[in-house]
Amino acid sequence: MPTTILSPAKRVFGTRAELRFACQNVLEKNSKETFTIPCEGLYPFQWLWDSAFIAVGWAHIDHNRARAEFQSLFDAQWSNGFMAHIIYHDDDRGKSYFPGSAFQGAARNPYSPTHVVTSGITQPPNLGAMLEILFDKELSEQVKLSPLNTPSVPDPHFYKKAIRHIFRFHEYLYRDRDPHNEGLTYIRHNWEAGTDNCTQFDAIWNTFDPINYDVQRRDTQHVNPKQRPTKKDYNYYLTLIEISRSVDFDEREMYEILPFLVQDPLFNSLLVASGESLARMARHFGMNVIAEQSEKWAMKTRNAMNEKLLDPLTGVYGYFDLRNNRLVGGMSSSNMTPLFAGIPSQKSAERLRETLESLHFAGRNNEYWLCATNAVTDPQFDRTRYWRGPVWININWLIWKGCLRYGFDDLARRIKRDTINLVLRYGVYEYFDPLKSAADNPEAHGFGGNNFSWTAALILDMLAENQ
Ligand code: GLC
């Protein structure tokens, strides 16, 4: 298999030890005591799924700090269980961020908290799965420390409360986001996907006309506009917020009127993984009602994903557009994340593995780093633009773990190697050019924000693991 030889001179970090040190520094610099911002300037508040990934990084540095990261998310939970994608701590910073809390307008919803302002949309439910990583780490370290080697429990007070918070979030999702009671929850905004402008959403944008906004975007002042969603894309995103705001983010009314209602494979995969993690932790503390319900939900979602979202033609999981009653297929790295939750059968998983190793992701001569966010063979593939081509570290981390789960050790090693190489070479960026030869250009750099927190956190985790 042809491989590309990389010249060490082009690396930002000479060694893995240097990289580890830099990643710790990124987390420490982005830390605001109880929460961590994703990136200075570009993302100045707390983001939901970012914080859960970031806590995995803190778990390698300071367990208390990792717990605080979760706690600050729980403190902003709505009274109906909903958890928001942005918590606008210190809202004055909102002046330099768009859309700020005023545009979101979620504070008018009667369930929203009064002590802090949040958005009215959520993000992929990775909390349970990430919390279990911290829990397992605390457990194994306490076992090592215990002189009699009797297993002791990590702080039950914190964990029991955390389990209840996450359970209430899942309860909200199954109650308010699963209208047909099929076990598949929908997202009602593309920002809820976490993969904001992925190519599959183009099919939805073609179904309605957005308002034409003349607003001052801030993201494109921090990052080259070629790496961010277009103005037209933003018109769609803001239109969805405006429709939601017009009904004060009332779930039932939004369900009636929003043109974007999508059963997303990444979102539902993380819900399955988190549900199973929650069940295991709840059993540990004798919280059997929560454990049983979480197991039931996870199994239902797993089955529904295999029945409804798995596209038999391509062998990858698709997005179900509930508004127009159709499966939107296509190949992107987020379609591979069901591996993380152990959703595909071994046979279906083999097909996903083959796809990742094929010309669609690796290229004809392995000229691409794994895993581009969109198949490199897709005419819509765009090397530089956000979720339409570049490699993202959180998705790679999920697929890496998924490959280990299915025994795809060679592919797991390769994904880990590519991921670490990208960050060694370019720095702790938000996303990366998947084309290997691009790295030979002395002008080449990482994409999006620099000193990006989840990149730092998940690289720390990869560096700490032997596999
Ligand atoms: C971007 C990403 C989203 C992330 C946010 C903060 O909007 O698409 O997934 O949560 O940045 O890092």
Image: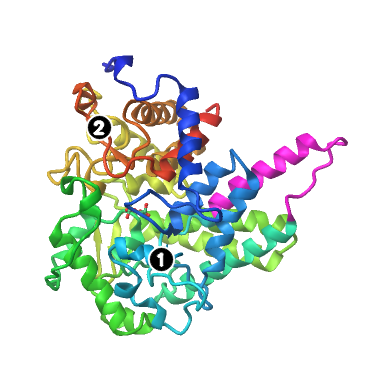
Amino acid on which disc 2 is placed: His
Q: Secondary structure at mark 1?
A: loop
Magenta: predominant secondary structure element? helix
Q: Residues within 10 Å of mark 1 (few under 14, many from 20)?
A: many
Q: Which residues are magenta?
A: 128-155
Residue 247 visible in image: yes
Q: Which residue bears the numbered disc 2?
A: 445
- x and y percent of residue 288 in the render? 71, 64
Quarter placement of the N terminus: top left
Residue 143 in magenta?
yes
- x and y percent of residue 203 in the render? 17, 61
Of 177 and 220, the residue lying toward us: 220
Reply above or below: 242 against 347: below
Is 270 on the left-hand or right-hand side of 64? left
Structural distance between the alpha carbons of marks 1 and 2: 31 Å
Ligand 1 under 8 Å from disc 1 Cβ:
no
Is 184 on the left-hand or right-hand side of 7? right
Is 159 on the left-hand or right-hand side of 321? right
Q: Which residue bears the numbered disc 1?
A: 122
